[in-house]
């Protein structure tokens, strides 16, 4: 889990799985989703990622094969800021209909709808033609493999917004 490819998604899901389940919730297996701030890159520029609004809840179940199935609902906003003073806040309320983490392979399949923010490494962005940080609206299915590769299974490119561009230009 030390790979940067999961940095953007894992704090929203896996940190919540580990910490959120002990925090109580709103019943029926729903617990608060924990979002941990982190740094990522837009090219050579460091971007500080925070969660100024995190009113999301998650429900985690385990399949017989050990795969964790994570559903997330609620409201969330992602804050993005550079050391140069550029910043923006983006709605990332999803919902995540089924995020699946396979602990055996280390793969994470991010399956969502609504408004989402995704983070890619420079290599993943180059391979997919997508920005390193982007938002999307509508159905999305992105498989983050433990070897660092990404497979885009579903993504409406007409709804992709490059979030690096305004951070780099102000």
Image: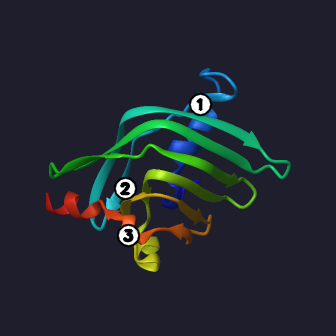
* Circles 1, 2 touching at the beta carbon (< 8 Å): no
Mark 2 or mark 3, which is nearer the start of the sequence?
2
Q: CA distance from mark 1 to mark 3?
A: 36 Å
Disc 2 packing (10 Å; few <14; some 14–19; many ≥20): many
Residue at 43 percent across and 59 percent down: it is 119
In the picture of the structure, the residue carrying the numbered disc 3 is 158
Q: Is residue 109 above or below residue 78?
A: below
Residue at 27 percent across and 66 percent down: it is 44
Q: Is residue 53 above or below residue 96?
A: above
In the picture of the structure, the residue carrying the numbered disc 1 is 19
In the picture of the structure, the residue carrying the numbered disc 2 is 40
Q: Nearer the viewer, mark 3 or mark 2?
A: 3
Q: CA distance from mark 3 to mark 2?
A: 24 Å
Disc 1 packing (10 Å; few <14; some 14–19; many ≥20): some
Mark 3 or mark 1, which is nearer the start of the sequence?
1
Disc 3 packing (10 Å; few <14; some 14–19; many ≥20): few
Between 45 and 131, the one nearer to me in the picture: 131
Q: Is residue 129 above or below residue 78?
A: below
Between 139 and 83, the one nearer to me in the picture: 139
Where does the image place residue 47, in percent across and percent down from the top left? 30, 53
Q: Nearer the viewer, mark 1 or mark 3?
A: 3
Where does the image place residue 113, in percent across and percent down from the top left? 52, 53
Where does the image place residue 70, in percent across and percent down from the top left? 65, 44
């Amino acid at each position: 889990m030390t790979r940067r490819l999961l940095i953007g998604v894992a704090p929203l899901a896996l940190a919540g799985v580990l910490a959120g389940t002990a925090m109580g919730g709103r019943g029926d297996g729903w617990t608060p989703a924990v979002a941990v701030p982190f740094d990522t890159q837009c090219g050579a520029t460091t971007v500080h990622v925070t969660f100024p609004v995190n009113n999301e809840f998650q429900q985690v179940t385990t399949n017989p094969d050990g795969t964790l199935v994570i559903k997330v609902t609620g409201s969330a906003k992602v804050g993005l800021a550079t050391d140069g003073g550029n910043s923006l806040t983006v709605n990332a309320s999803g919902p995540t209909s089924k995020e699946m983490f396979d602990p055996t392979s280390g793969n994470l399949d991010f399956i969502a709808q609504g408004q989402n923010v995704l983070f890619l490494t420079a290599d993943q962005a180059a391979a997919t033609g997508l920005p390193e940080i982007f938002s999307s609206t509508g159905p999305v299915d992105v498989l983050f493999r433990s070897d660092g590769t990404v497979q885009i299974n579903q993504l409406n490119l007409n709804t992709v917004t490059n979030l690096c561009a305004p951070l780099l230009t102000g």
